[in-house]
Amino acid sequence: MAPSYHLQIVNLLAALLLLISFAMLSQRRIVGLITLFAWQGMALAASAALVAWATGQHHLYYSAALTLVLKVIAMPWFFYRTVRKLDVDRDVEPMINIPTTMLIGIVLVIFAFNLALPISQFSGTVTRSTLGIALACVLLGFLMMITRKKAIPQVIGFLAIENSLFFAATSATYGMPLVVELGVALDVMVGVIVLSIFFFQIREAFDSLDLKHMEKLKER
Amino acid sequence: MSTGIVLQFTQTLLAILLAPLLMGWVNQCRAWLQGRNAPPITQPYRTLRKLFHKDAVIAHNASPLFRFAPYMIFSCMALAAGIVPTIANDLPFSPAADAIALVGIFALARVFLALAAMDVGTSFGTLGARREMLVAFLAEPALLMVFFTASLISHSTELPVIVAALAHREFAIYPSLAFAGVAFWMISVAENARIPVDNPTTHLELTMIHEAMILEYSARHLALIEWAVALKLFTYSALGIALFLPWGIAEQGRVDMLPLALLAMIAKLLLGGALLAFIETISAKVRLFRAPEFLGTAFMLAVLGMLINFLLDV
Amino acid sequence: MEILSLFPREPVQWAWGFVLFWLALGFVGLLMQGSQWLRSGLVFSLGAFGALGIAGVGVAGLMSPASSMILPIGLPELPFHLRLDALSAFFMVLLGSAAFGVTVYASSYFKSMVAGSLALLSLWYHLFLAGMAMVLLADDAYAFMVAWEVMALSSYFLVTTDHKIPEIRRAGFLYLLIAHVGAISLLLTFGVLQGGQGDYTFDTMRFAQLTPFWASVVYLLALFGFGAKAGLVPLHVWLPEAHPAAPSPVSALMSGVMLKTAIYGLLRVTFDLLNVQVAWWGTLALALGLITALYGVIFAAVQSDMKRLLAWSSIENIGVILAAFGLTLIFYTDGKGALAALTLTALLYHAINHAFFKGLLFVGTGSVLHATGVRHMGYLGGLMRFMPWTAWLTLIGALAIAGLPPLNGFVSEWLLLQAFLLTPGLSQPYLNMVIPVAAATVALAAALSAYVMVKFYGVIFLGQPRDQALQHAHDIDWAGRLGMLWLAAGCVLLGLLPTQVISWIEPVVRMLVGQALPGSGNWLLLTPISAERASYAPLIFFAVVAVVLLLTFFWVRRIYHGRVRRSDPWDCGYPEQDARMQDSAEGFGQPIRQIFEVFMQVERETPDPFDRQPRYRGASLDKLWFILYLPIARVVGWLSDQAGRLQHGRIQWYLIYSFATLIFLLVFTR
Amino acid sequence: MEIYWLLGIPLTGGTFLGLWGSRKNAPEINAFFSFLTLLAAAFLTYRIVDQGPMIVGEGWFFIDSFNVFLVALTAFVAFTTALFSRPYMRIEKEHGKLNDKRLRLYHSSYQIFIGAMFLALTTNNMGILWVAMEAATLATVLLVSLYRTPASLEAAWKYFILCGVGIALALFGTILLYFAAEKVLGSGGGALLWTHLNGVKDRLEPTVLSLAFVFLLVGYGTKVGLAPLHSWLPDAHAEGPTPVSAVLSGLLLNVALYAVMRSKVLVDGALENDMASNLMMGFGLLSVVLAAFLIKRQTDVKRMFAYSSIEHMGLITFAFGMGGPVANFAALLHMTMHSLTKSAIFFAVGHATQKAGTQLMADISGLIKTNPTIGWGLMLGTIAILGVPPFGVFASEFLIITTAMHEHPWATPFLLLALGVAFASIFGKVQPMVFGETDLPKLPYQPALTPVFLHLGLVLMLGLFIPPYLAAWYKQAAQILGG
């Protein structure tokens, strides 16, 4: 059994993750959003590594490294590039104003927690309580996707969901089998590539990344 | 059986021969009532004779149906007169056609008359046919209902059985029969083209029904139709008598009763004819559009009679 | 010996053989690259031969006990079960005998069609026949439904043969839609009837023990499903559209035979598959039947399109049949077997009668259409002189359907009315009240149908031609005449030999209600109950009329000279004589319209005094369409608008849907 | 062994076509690879029918009669679609809607898409199943936006985002599954193998599994197109090229439903209640009804048939929800029939729209005149999909509706209503397209309609006669699904 301060650190990281999610929710500028996303990835990698060290699940080191490479370096860099290229770095007006979003977010967190409460009892892992936080992050990411009106923030929300899923996988269950991890990572990478193609297509079709141009297909 | 056959033929023949007489009698009564000096009672026979002697004039575009119809109508009426018990009961023909079939026979004759009227394609012919069918579609079911009322009492649709049931049993009051009687009266007035529904003596195009249909007929065809009309009147009167005052009709195989029956029959017919003439004189012809209402009333009365029968009599 | 063992013995095997023959014929007709004569003449006359075979099989089936077989097709646990018992055998006879005449007629009617469409048409036509036969043979729910829908589908394609015309397309669409909805409700019927665990054979259904509630559910669903096919008011709207749209022989089959398959199904489910009957079923069916009969005949009276008129009159006849069905149920549930037998006999008798005279009338209009190309009665008239065959044969049909003795229509009506007369003493008193009114309604409908037929026949065949072109109308050729002759002969024989026909029907009646009519010893005399009760001897009747007629004729001829002079019609001496002065179809229907205007949505187009060429147009439309069907359509449209609102293009909203669903489920499943 | 061929051929095909680029006979090569895949699938199927279920590759792959029949179906439809797309895409190119680059993209990702679906079907590992589903999505996103028109881009974007989110939820569900499993099976690779899970399903923790199933259902359900998660489906089907629409609604939806069913089996084992069944019945009914009413207001033919796919998927889901041998059998049968018929319809529609130059039904009429085969193909296909016998769709609908009436009578009014409305809407719109007059000239080229009539012929045959081995196959599958 690993000494308890590991757990405290992991829980701390979990709290940090939640905090970052909230920050993303309230962040207006895209660049800031990307930075937060990078930080989230960092926290993720750290927690993965920590859990790996604490529990001796070595394959978690690989996933930690993978996360570091993908989500802290590759993707943020890519997003910065895109934003610069398409210069879309303006203030992002969310559909619902920030305070309201925050309130909804808090409600969601409470909901997630007492949803996860009965489950975490059964967890054999040291970091059972993190499941609730992961779930909360998923829901917050979802909320962010709903509230943002531009393409890139929406995608970042999507990736935030991916992050929290990954967090759930690592901290709550000590990681999925490595193959799955790799597969997931691969999918995420391909997804991002596809996205990059998309951004340019959308850009050249609508010459902006604002989603309001994409409401033509409907029942009328 | 042989007596039955003989009876059957005599009765049918008698009916065919006597029918115009009844017509003449009615006309005579009416003339008296209206204060005219009457034609002789044999006037109808003279008319028939005259008509048979004439050359037939037929429209160019008349089809064979036109010439075939009068014979058809006549023979239908003859059969009808044959199966209604006038003087003797339980005739060999009568099982061949019961009350419902009788209605069917009338309908057959009527349809042929209407078709013949439409055949030449004159404005009046079609008009008459339409009006005739209009009258019929209410009168026919009403007549059927009258028969039903009678046959619900006698538990049979066989005319002889009905008559037997009504005549040869202890006297009983049937409220339903009262309704049926009134209905039957109204129906027979309509069916025989009498006032107040139709007027056999008018040729005013606005009002005529029956006359309009036979406008194109002449000579022997006309004669046959006239005769058929007389037969119809006779048959209806006989029916009314058989249903509503059947006393005196000879029972099964009672040949000795026949003369009495014959006398009773004639008496009743004279009475009925006079009554008909009287009512015709005192009543005015209704407008054609009122005719459906008149007949509707008859229909309702008949149905009511049947209902009453279910309520009270059974 | 091998050959002999291959050789079918049971009637059902023969029936299946003939069905196969029809199917094969259909595809041969599709693929055959021959002359028109080869196609229409050969294929259709072979089809007629098949029909004759089916009729023969039916007769054999009536004679012999029920025989059944199993085909190696269908669902895995559920191969097609076929069974030929008395009931299906009787309807087989109906199908075969009516279809024979119609198909013989068709072989000459379709001669003038273009090759391509004729090839398709012969395929659908024979598929249609085969489908109807299979409906009668099927002994499990799946086979039944397949046959049922094949019948509907092929008839749909027959209806839309001339699909260039939008009205016809609309008619076909309406037809298939209502047929499909009815079919779904039949599915539900069988869903209740099935033993569960997917055993759909009728045999197991016969032994299914249902509570009265579920039995009633089955009955109502079946009434809906079969009623939709039979044209029961208010499910009748497709019928006056589809039947006129189809080519006349097809209309004849649809009206004469296809509607009867619905009656067959109703009898099968109610009396054979269900082993519990509830009293009020009969009253419901009786009421619906009477309403249908009256509604149909009233609208028939105001039609001006001849085929539409016939279609409405089909609705009337179905109504009469359904009323008989209701009476049968009433008597049966009331334990009055003899009366049930009587009404059931009347029902079956009327069914086969209608097959014959309606078939005859429809092919009659077919040859009118063929000769003149006109369906609207306002442009016809006087055809009796140009096409005597058609005219005289149609006259028989018209008299028969008008219920006049001594033809067949009268017999069934007579039997039905007798049943009405025998009702006193039913256990429920309220029925004793209902019955007289019912009897009155039936009588009224019958009388009105006479009105309708006088209009139909008089306007089309009598009077002066309303159009000069009609002068050149030519009669149909010999094959067509042969077909019509067969149908007309059927009308006459069914009218003259009721006792024989009833003795054929007897096994069916015995099978369904347990007993049959007591036959009188005398083969001339039709006595349903007893000689005192009622009797009818059409042969004597006919003989007397004929004899009297001949006697009078010869007497007149002998005594008086037969000189005849031809001249213009007199017409009260009016100088102007014009074909347009005759009653038009609308004019003839006018009084009825005036009396029953409440049921109709009347559209009039009256000319004002200053019209250059004044013309009058009047149409009496079915009010039910406006007060029932259009509102339903509107409600559906409104609902779909509401549904459409959900889909309004904004991705955030779509995400909210998923989010809400997720949250809801999470809350819901805790 | 066949299994590796099955997975290998499409992937090599994809890469090869990617390299081969737009040389002239790329479509033929595409069809050729699809044919090889079909062969491999046939061998595999034969093996399974011969020897029963088997586990390959130290437990990574598991093939039983349930997924092998989907494999066969997928391979077959993929092959016929390749045949159809060969002339179709050529003409699209002639019309200038496509260029060589996109055609190459189309061909290579078509193969990869097929490969991904095979992986999803054959894998034994719930995690890999998820990965494969995601891969299939990614492979098709760019196909949907192949025409680069604003509309197609929008459709693809919605497809990507909605399905991405959905699939992410499915991943969370999978994690929860693993979370519950590792306590029974211990952590490591074994804990996600379906066979192992199936072995111990009654020991899995119910509360966790119910939660997991909610996530899995919402996640994969999005890809099945269950209302109200269906919003992406009509857009993607209507805007993508027709072959893609055909495989999307003919195959992808099935595979997604397959994933749902795999997890349902586990959940049913773990929870003794019928929570999963009720959920599926609810979703199914909702989809059927909603789709029926949405069909009524369509003007675009492909969009309309996309909604009809939703309707049928709803029907299948409802049937699976009812459970029991008959309903499961019916649902599997309906899966087959729907894929065959719907893809056939899309083929016919593709040619029709290509000829008319529009997807608006109002502007298409008289197909029977311009090209009888297309006309009759569309007409018969429509009749088949509407559940009119003797076509096979009726067989399954017959079983579904009768069973529903027998076991859940409350649901039947909705079914009756929905089927009636759907029939009226679809048939009322297709009839004037097929029948009636038109001024369009006859087709200049011969359309590739062999697939259409091949499919319809099969559907017709299955409606009248289901071969015993096929039936046995269905029955085993139904049993696996807890018959």
Image (spheres, coloured by chain):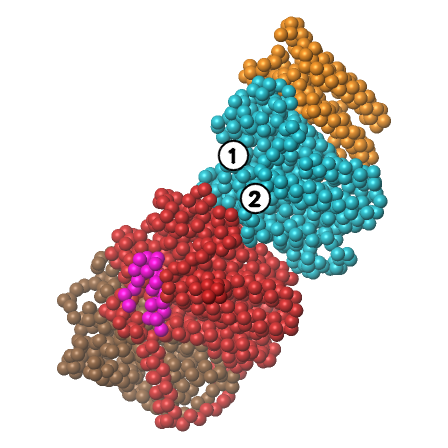
Disc 1 on helix, strand or loop?
loop
Disc 2 on helix, strand or loop?
helix
Q: Is residue C509 magenta?
A: yes
Q: Quick one: which chain is orange?
A: A
Locate the N terminus of chain A and report the quarter of the image it occupies: top right
Query: What residue does disc 2 label?
Result: D333
Report the residue at 40% width, 51% height from top: C203
The colour chain B appears in is: brown
Report the residue at 17% width, 64% height from top: B172
Query: What residue does disc 1 label?
Result: D482
Q: Quick one: which chain is red?
A: C
Give how far across and how far down residue D338 sits, in percent.
61, 45
Q: How many marks?
A: 2
Marks 2 and 1, Cα distance to the nearest angstrom? 16 Å
User: Which segment did they paint magenta?
Assistant: C497-519
The colour chain D appears in is: cyan
**Which picture quadrant has residue C651?**
top right
Q: Amino acid at mark 2?
A: Leu
